[in-house]
Amino acid sequence: MTTSVAPQPNAAYRPGYTRGYFARAANLRTGERFWSVGRIVAILALVVMAVAWLLPFLWAVVTSFKSETSAAATPVSWLPSDGFTTDAYTSVLREGNIPLWTWNSLVTATAITAITLVVSSLAAYALARIDFRGRRWLFLLIVASIIVPPPVLIVPLFYEMLNLNLVDTYWAIILPQLVHPAMVFVLMKFFQQVPVELEDAARIDGAGRVRVFWSVVLPLSRPILAAVGIFVFVLAWNNFLWPFIITSDASLMTLPVGLQTVKSAYGLQYAQTMASAVLAALPLIVVFLFFQRQIIRGFSTTGFGGQ
């Protein structure tokens, strides 16, 4: 006669077990100490890093609301002696064409993001799932192109746009920014984590390669696609050098380029410079606030989150 021993339930499913990240500190039965020394050190290090990143932005915001006299005064102080003012923003908005430049940045950044997602996802899926001749060499070429500094390509890209008669057009801004080898690498690593059994089941039902990619792989890849899209959008929005070189028409300038043309006759104006930087960063802050969950989920699904 054999006796069977009932398996012990997992601690995470015990009756009365308190779930949640912070609530685990109350679950002494698990033997886990929430406020360990290592955790406290990690939290303090993250706080220091967050403050170090936020201080320059906070300084820019405060300086943008100062008068030019207070912004250039020495010794430097956080609070202006003559009070806060919006004169810097008024000058930038009056002397520049902010709505048009913002629209140009929105059009180009959105187009770059959409086309990059299509091209990069197709290339990444081919590298992850299709065994074709030269696949290894193509992968090595993509990885090697990541270390190539973008300024090295400015001269050949400019001559290419010049020969195609695309200078001072939207396409001249968009086309050279469509290649992102790092994003192809990230997407490929994610596609390799998708279970092959799901694709095999779709093929048994008669789905082709394109249908499998569209109906099976892409719906499972929404977090990483959202994260990659946000990264590409931010890079395209902040890009100053290439739009500055390829456009001379004020009606085609992007926001970072247009704001640099707003200069005073009195030389460098610190308050106006900071006001321009805040105006250029404001749309990106809004994008991050709306899509921060997708960014975090994208990190966690690509292995950067420790999984």
Image: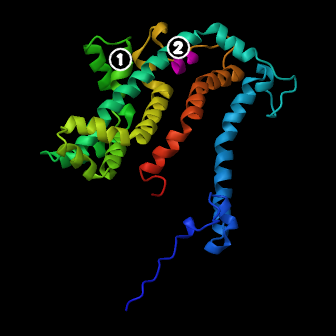
Q: Give the spatial CA distance, label 1 vs label 2.
A: 16 Å
Estimate how packed mark 1 is, as few (under 14), some (14 to 19) or many (20 or more) residues with alpha carbons within 10 Å.
many
Note whether 137 is above or below 279 in the view shown: below
The residue that mark 2 highlights is: 101
Horizontal side of 216 relative to 298 (left or right) equals: left
Point out the stretch of residues depicted in magenta: 255-260
Q: Quadrant of the C terminus?
A: bottom left
Across and down, in percent, residue 218 comes to 34, 38
Q: Is residue 147 visible?
A: no
Q: Residue furthest front?
A: 1
Q: Quadrant of the N terminus?
A: bottom left
Along the viewing direction, whichever of 108 and 18 lies nearer the viewer: 18
Which amino acid type corresponds to the residue marked 2 in the rendered image?
Trp
Residue positioned 38% across, 89% down in the render: 2
Q: Residue furthest left?
A: 133
Circle number at residue 172:
1
Asked if residue 71 lies in the magenta stretch, the reply is no
Note whether 54 is above or below 80 in the view shown: below
Horizontal side of 156 relative to 233 (left or right) equals: left
Q: In which image quadrant can residue 161 be found?
A: top left
Across and down, in percent, residue 63 comes to 74, 27
Across and down, in percent, residue 72 comes to 76, 26
Q: Residue furthest bottom?
A: 1
Which circle's residue, 1 or 2, is located before the other in the chain?
2
Horizontal side of 149 relative to 90 (left or right) equals: left
Q: Is residue 145 visible?
A: yes
Which amino acid type corresponds to the residue marked 1 in the rendered image?
Ala
